[in-house]
């Protein structure tokens, strides 16, 4: 038994879905599109009932990808997801527009039930709805009044679904437009005439069904008063800025300790494996490949959870659409829309949840552009790289009241934003689409978020990242481990053997120094090390040497790996004050040909610019693949960002050296 | 010809016709059809979108989208 859930966006369809299925939800694919298919099993039912949550739509005639999905399913009796019955969620506080979709679905001839939702809000608006009359005038369809947010009426809805009554209207609402699995009218103009006819008929019906009771203080006017503040030319933007600041404060304050905890946990797991299992290749694979690989996936969970927690609150309260409303004006010239703002800004924390958040953009072209440019925003993983390099090469001077170090850091963030907008402009001309860009959007009433919906949403996002993107991230980390741990022939073994081994009675310190040297020499002679040497001619014009080449390759796993790789290459132990000793080592590094220091202002800035632009995050690529479901897009992203990084770093170095 | 984008805030009018364009059917889906009464309730700053009232629900649309709506 397949039951499809259909309804307008903001009709509370997701709440109904959550109430019907609880945590028994899974995410799959609708064939051929990037829209995710959410389905679950009906609670309380004896026999399995699959509930499919179809994307929120306003009409059966498709204008967006979401609407196309529903069109494809309902217009094809042979479709794997063609439903046995349909539950249409209808917003009682906004009947006219919601009934357009309902009557269209009704005419498709599938048994249908109306879940008349938000009856509480209708009541507050002073609307008295005669459901019996409505049912009668619609040809005897079954109507169940519910309040999905509180669960009122859900039991009745479930009873209705499992009763399997052949709920159908005695006659079509408007004949000759739809039939079982068929759309009879393909002419665009004729479709519009039909929609208009439907509205006329609906208005007639509503005259008999809805009575407006006088209300003392209109709920709508109160909400619009809030709207005027939140969209005010000054306060609107100030409030948004304030909320953003709060969100980022919270992310930095709350994500850090669980991330450190995860880091420590996986590090000690690696150590434990190494100390417990017999030494050998398998132990190394587990301790240095698999465990850190898993850790590299899990480490993102705190940021994903926090960011989506906040985005959920912004969406559920209805504030997000006001943000879109006041920012659309500024995003349009770049081929983006108001909905791109939150993903772009979230990119400053982490591109992964940011890219997952682009789903709210219903125009595919604008969504794709947002996905393509979001990783240019300087994410938090770039910060350790910037900090190290700024400390290394930027002098501690002041320009007016501002410290030069701080200015450089600010500049790096700004350059990321500017690049994102400019590249968006370029993509605007290259990506072709039939969809028209529009912002015809409902501004829903403000609501308190439902916390059980929050739990379900967060669980869905984390699961999607860990199990879908996680596979790719994990595989690449294993490959990187292999490349860093093995070298051709016995080159690595010979190099290691050349290091004088400490005698038995030497101090702990000397023993550690020896181990660090072994790690350093091993890395230099591994495949990655050889690759680092090999690319040296290509990166010399940027002011880099082969050591930096190695770090560039290893930081493909994640940007912050740069610091660790540098520490390994310059064999600086982790037991000491790593950063300081590393800085000293890097500062004293001389170019073998010229005798000049390697890390100068020119090469340091060139390296920072490279990290600002380069696509050095396999996790981002994995999530782009997941969201676009096409290898082409992460590949284009990898190529254009790395290309941009190379050229920009080249210019920086050549100008400054 | 009077169009929705040129109206003052809180001026109540009736939709007369929609200019035929790729967006017309989208506007109709959202409840804007000839005969419907509509008024601008607030606007985004700097020439951004406008918010209109349609029977107690708020719809936002860009200025150039509103210019497709002929009113009287």
Image (cartoon, helix red, strand yellow):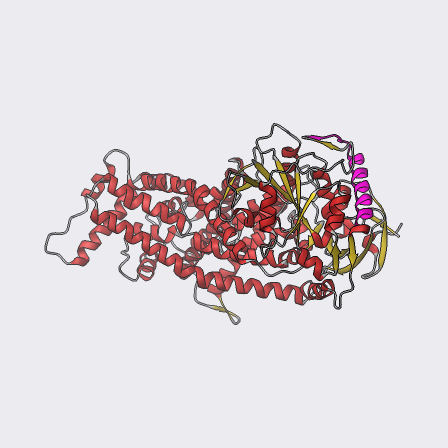
Residue A529, position as x, y percentages in the image: 32, 42
The tally of labels here is 0
Outermost residue to the bottom:
A401
Q: Position of residue A9 (x, y in %)?
A: 65, 48
Toward the viewer: A197 or A278? Answer: A197
Judge by depth and name the residue closer to the eye, B56 or A163: A163
Residue plotted at (81% across, 48% down): A203
Q: Quadrant of residue B38?
A: bottom right
Farthest residue toward the top? A78
Q: Give the overall secondary structure of the magenta segment.
A: helix
Q: Which residue is at the front of the view, B22 or A421? A: B22
**Residue A641, percent from left and from top:** 51, 44
Figure quadrant of residue A557: top left
Q: Residue reaching furthest left?
A: A505
Q: Residue A194 colored magenta?
A: yes
Classify A421 as above or below A189.
Answer: below
* Horizontal side of residue A96 vs A80, given as left or right: right
Q: Position of residue A186 (x, y in %)?
A: 75, 31
Can I make out residue A472 in this image? yes
At x 63% / y 66%, what residue is drawn?
A238
Quick check: can you spot residue B29? no
Query: Eyeballing the image, is A40 above or below A505?
Result: above
Does the stretch in magenta take in A84? no
In the rendered image of this protein, does residue A643 appear above or below residue A301? above
Q: What segment carries the magenta color?
A: A182-206
Dividing the image into 4 quarters, which one contains the N terminus of chain A? top right
* In-image side of A400 versus A441 (left or right): left
In the figure, is residue A556 to the left or right of A288?
right
């Amino acid at each position: 038994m397949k039951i499809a859930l259909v309804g307008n966006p903001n009709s509370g369809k997701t709440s109904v879905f959550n109430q019907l299925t609880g945590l028994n939800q899974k995410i799959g694919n609708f064939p051929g599109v990037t829209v995710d298919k959410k389905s679950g099993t009906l609670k309380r039912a004896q026999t399995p009932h699959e509930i499919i949550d179809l994307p929120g739509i306003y009409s059966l005639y498709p204008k967006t990808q979401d609407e196309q999905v529903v069109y494809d399913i309902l217009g094809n009796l042979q479709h794997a997801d063609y439903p046995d019955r349909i539950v249409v969620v209808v917003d009682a506080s906004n009947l006219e527009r919601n009934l357009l979709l309902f009557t269209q679905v009704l005419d498709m001839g599938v048994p249908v039930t109306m879940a008349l939702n938000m009856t509480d809000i209708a009541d507050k608006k002073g609307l008295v709805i005669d459901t019996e009359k409505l049912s009668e005038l619609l040809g005897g369809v079954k109507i169940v009044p519910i309040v999905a947010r509180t669960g009122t009426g859900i039991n009745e809805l479930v009873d209705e679904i499992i009763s399997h009554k052949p709920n159908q209207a005695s006659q079509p609402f408007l004949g000759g437009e739809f039939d079982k699995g068929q759309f009879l009218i393909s002419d665009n103009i004729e479709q519009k005439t039909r929609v208009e006819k439907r509205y006329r008929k609906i208005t007639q019906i509503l005259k008999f069904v809805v009575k407006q009771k006088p209300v003392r203080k209109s709920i709508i006017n109160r909400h619009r008063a809030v709207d005027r503040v939140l969209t005010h030319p000054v306060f609107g933007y100030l409030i948004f800025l304030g909320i953003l600041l709060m969100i980022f404060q919270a992310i930095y304050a709350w994500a850090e300790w669980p991330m450190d905890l995860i880091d420590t946990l996986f590090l000690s797991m690696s150590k434990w494996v190494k100390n417990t299992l017999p030494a050998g290749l398998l132990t190394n694979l587990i301790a240095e490949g698999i465990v850190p690989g898993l850790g590299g996936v899990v480490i993102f969970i705190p940021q994903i959870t926090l960011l989506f927690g906040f985005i959920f609150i912004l969406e559920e309260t209805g504030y997000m659409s006001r943000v879109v409303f006041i920012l659309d004006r500024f995003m349009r010239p770049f081929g983006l829309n108001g909905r791109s703002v939150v993903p772009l800004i979230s990119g400053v924390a982490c591109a992964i949840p940011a890219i997952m958040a682009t789903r709210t953009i219903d125009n595919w072209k604008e969504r794709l552009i947002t996905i393509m440019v979001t990783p240019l925003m300087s994410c938090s993983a770039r910060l350790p790289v910037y900090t190290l390099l700024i400390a290394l090469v930027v002098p501690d001077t002041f320009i007016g009241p501002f410290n030069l170090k701080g200015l450089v850091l600010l500049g790096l963030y700004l350059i990321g934003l500017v690049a994102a907008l400019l590249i968006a402009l370029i993509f605007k001309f290259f990506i072709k689409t039939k969809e028209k860009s529009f912002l015809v959007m409902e501004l829903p009433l403000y609501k308190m978020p439902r916390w059980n919906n929050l739990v379900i949403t967060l669980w869905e996002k984390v699961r999607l990242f860990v199990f879908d993107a996680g596979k790719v991230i994990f595989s690449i980390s294993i490959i990187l481990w292999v490349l860093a741990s093995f070298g051709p022939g016995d080159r690595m073994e010979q190099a290691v053997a050349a290091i004088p081994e400490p005698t038995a009675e030497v101090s702990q310190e000397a023993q550690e120094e020896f181990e660090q040297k072994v790690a350093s020499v091993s890395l230099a002679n591994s495949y990655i090390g050889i690759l680092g040497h090999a690319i040296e001619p290509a990166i010399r014009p940027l002011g880099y040497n082969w050591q930096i080449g190695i770090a560039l390759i290893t930081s493909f796993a994640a940007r912050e790996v740069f610091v660790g790789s540098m520490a390994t290459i310059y064999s600086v132990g982790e037991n000491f004050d790593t950063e300081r000793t590393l800085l000293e080592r890097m500062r004293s590094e001389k170019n073998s040909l010229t005798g000049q220091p390697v890390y100068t202002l020119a090469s340091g800035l060139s390296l920072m610019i490279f990290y600002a632009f380069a696509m050095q995050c396999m996790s981002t690529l994995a999530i782009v693949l997941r969201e676009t479901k096409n290898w082409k897009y992460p590949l284009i992203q990898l190529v254009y960002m790395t290309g941009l990084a190379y050229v920009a770093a080249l210019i920086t170095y050549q100008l400054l050296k | 010809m009077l169009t929705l984008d040129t109206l003052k805030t809180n001026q109540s009018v009736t939709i007369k016709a929609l200019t035929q364009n790729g967006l017309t059917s989208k506007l109709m889906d959202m409840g804007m059809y000839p005969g419907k009464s509509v008024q601008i309730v607030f606007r985004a700053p700097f020439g951004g979108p406008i918010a209109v009232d349609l029977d107690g629900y708020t719809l936002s649309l860009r200025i150039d989208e509103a210019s497709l709506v002929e009113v009287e």
